[in-house]
Amino acid sequence: MSYLAEYDSISPANTLQRIQAVSKWIRNRDDVRAFFAELRERRPIFFTPAFTFITKYEDVLEVLNRDDIFSVRLNGLKMDEAVGPFMLGRDRTAINYHDKSLMRLVLAREDLPRVRKLVSKITEEAVSASACSGEIELVKNIARRVPVKLCGAYFGFPGPDEESMFRWSKATQTDFFKNITNDPQIHQEAVQAGKELASYLTTLIAQKRKEIADNSQEHDNDVLTRLLLAEFPDQLGFKSDRLITNISGLLVGTVETTAQAVVQALEQILLHPGIGKSALKAAKADSLVEFDNIVWEALRFNPINPLVFRYTETDTLLAEGTEREVKIPQGTIVFACTASAMWDSNFVVNADQFRVGRPSHSYFHFGYAAHECLGKYVGMVMIPEIIRVLLLQNVSLIDGDKGKIDFEGDVFPSKFMVNIGK
């Protein structure tokens, strides 16, 4: 029975069962691609009692481009209580424009070679500290640990300890971007994490200000220090609370998404011996362009997040002028299914094939348009460099269930055991 046949067999009056069915399919990595393929073919704009799926490439782009209509309002409501008014929870506002511009200035593109070297060094050290008995668990020991260490080395806030940084990042990321059902416990954990993070940063900022005052000639070359050295006019309102919110956002957006991208892309590379051989060769080349392209294509086969959700601010037509034109009512939660868009053969050539060097518009790994990831370019060197170092350490898959990515019932990977050095 097809997915839609199974869905249609459920009585329309039984809304909970219908919601449970589609929720199961999008959470199951083995189901979601086939489910999306059926939707693209038969019901590309698919209404359910709780949310509406948008599955074709051009319609996903329309939703993500029309941020005045399809807003991040629901994300913002969660963020405000945890970390304060945040650019990621705003559309077409001064906070969005000002804060994003300022943060992009201090996250300088010129830093990327230095960042990549830092990531390489941190990853090698993490492997040396964690590998034993020819096996290594990658999620906590490498894929989460490296971005946390980078927070200290490049962003300028190391945190009180690794476990606190892991918990703060996971709690906020889960609530802001995964808590579609508004589970109050998940939200409260994020609010508590935000309070602890703000308290830590308040103390850290005071310490750094004193260090800057005591040593006026030499300063650390990290993102937080750059922000503290900058002089912003009062009209911009970029004072201590705004500073804490934006620095908090660096942790929120760095750890769990990086960890998930690393393990899921690496698994795809290792699952296919031919691809793994090509990746290892590219990892040793002087130019890493081809290697990085292999990583992004591998991630297309198992992307970080199959969808992003948006809130419909007013009644609007979607796909206007096409045979699938439909009215989306105000208040509708729409799922822009980016994982589906990356497999839409009308826009992605030979979508079912592993092809290295696809044009950048084939991917949605870092979001799109107004809400493209702030740290995109840091992620574009960090994710492939972690994988490159692991491949050079001769990692391989462990047979059986032990060697599979384990979510342990969570929304993010919890465990991924691999062979190393064999």
Image (cartoon, rainbow, N blue to C red):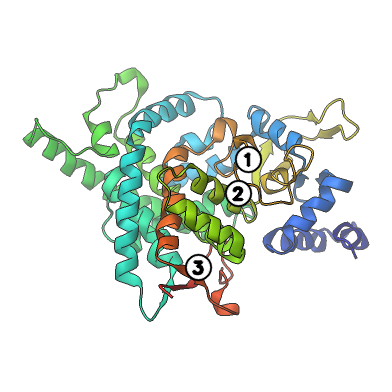
Q: Amino acid at mark 3?
A: Ser
| Residue at image mark 3 | 414
Visible residue check, residue 8: yes
| Residue at image mark 2 | 297
Note whether 100 is above or below 299 in the view shown: above
Q: Which quadrant of the rendered structure holds the C terminus?
A: bottom left
Q: Amino acid at mark 1?
A: Arg
Instruction: Give the side of residue 211 with respect to residue 146, left or right.
Output: left
Residue 349 location, x and y as percent? Answer: 74, 41
Pointer 2 local density, CA inside 10 Å: few below 14, some 14–19, many at least 20: many
Q: Secondary structure at mark 1?
A: loop
Q: Earlier in the sequence, mark 2 or mark 1?
A: 2
Visible residue check, residue 184: no
CB within 8 Å, label 3 to label 1: no
Q: In this view, which residue lies farthest toward the left?
A: 214
Q: CA distance from mark 3 to mark 1?
A: 30 Å
Q: Secondary structure at mark 3?
A: loop
Q: Secondary structure at mark 2?
A: helix
Residue at point 71%, 64% (across, down): 30
Q: Which mark is residue 358?
A: 1
Residue 226 location, x and y as percent? Answer: 25, 32
Pointer 3 local density, CA inside 10 Å: few below 14, some 14–19, many at least 20: some
